[in-house]
Image (cartoon, helix red, strand yellow):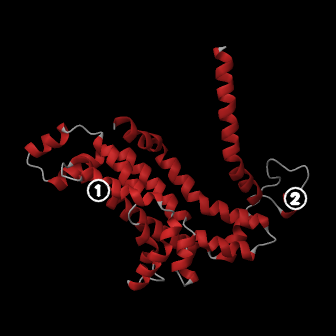
Amino acid sequence: MKAVKVILVYAVLIALAVFTVWPYYWMLKISLETAASVYAWPPNWIPDPPTLENYITVWKTMGVWRYLLNSIIISGIGVFVSVTFAALFAYPLARFEFPGRNLIFFLVLLPMMVPAQGSFIINFLTIRRLGLVNTYWGVILPMAVTLFGVFLLRQSYMGIPRDYEDAARIDGASEFFIWFRVMLPMIKPSLATLVLLQFIAFWNNFLWPLIVLRDPNMYPLSVGLLYLNDSFQTNLRSVAAGAVIATAPIALLFLFLQQYFVKGLTAGGVKY
């Protein structure tokens, strides 16, 4: 009976894995096919023959380097600013004792209930008043503070025994030294998880850059793909190649940080 239960669990997990991976596999397969084989019936499960012609076409037609550079600038600065703010903001909420601490934490989490689209008008009026329309900072600033990041890092800070910071204070360390050299290294899995989540959020952000940016040369890759879809309406293979190029950096970053990802998501909840 136990063996049957294990087999059923594995069957469900394998089915879920196939269901999850299938869209990306099919997109990758189409991007490597020729015009003659893409509509073949029955379909080829492996491109025969495989070709990189679609990637070359997209690269030459679309100006991918410009969009990639814009995405790297926006995502790089955005991740650094948002993770730094979250780490600084969560630290006193977790480690300092002061009246109203829990109320402040509740008020911080309250805006998470509001859909992001609900704040677009206020954010746009603020960005325009600051003169940041059509700038990278205009795209980054509305996402510079991640409330989920504050929640995640606060839970991780609270899982650290107070003996570490007490020992550092006895040695004469400042609060900044304790935060930077003692606390941050101990929540490395949560920081890595937040870096990955924020990178995905900035990299895939589509609507807000389209609203704020006026110059197409400043568009990130997510918005640039819209032009790709218009340019290759009848060329499904090139659209698939562009989508693979856009998602490749996220897959590489996940592979690099995967050892921290699950640990970072569960650490705060287990220790709290």
Amino acid type assigned to the residue bearing label 2 in the image: Tyr
| Residue at the disc numbered 2 | 39
Distance between the Cα atoms at labels 1 and 2?
Answer: 58 Å
Residue 100 x/y as whole percent: 23, 53
In depth, the one of 168 and 266 nearer the eye is: 266
On screen, 55 above or below 23?
Answer: below
Residue 241 x/y as whole percent: 70, 63
On screen, 186 above or below 248?
Answer: above
Q: Quadrant of the C terminus?
A: top left
* Residue shown at the point (50%, 53%) measured from the top left: 253
Specify the farthest residue to the top.
1
In depth, the one of 108 and 64 nearer the eye is: 108
Does the residue at mark 1 contact the one at mark 2 (Cβ under 8 Å)? no
Residue 77 x/y as whole percent: 41, 67
Q: Quadrant of residue 217?
A: bottom right
Judged from the image, the secondary structure of the residue bearing numbered disc 1 is helix
Give me the disc on residue 104: 1
From where the camera sits, is residue 94 visible? yes
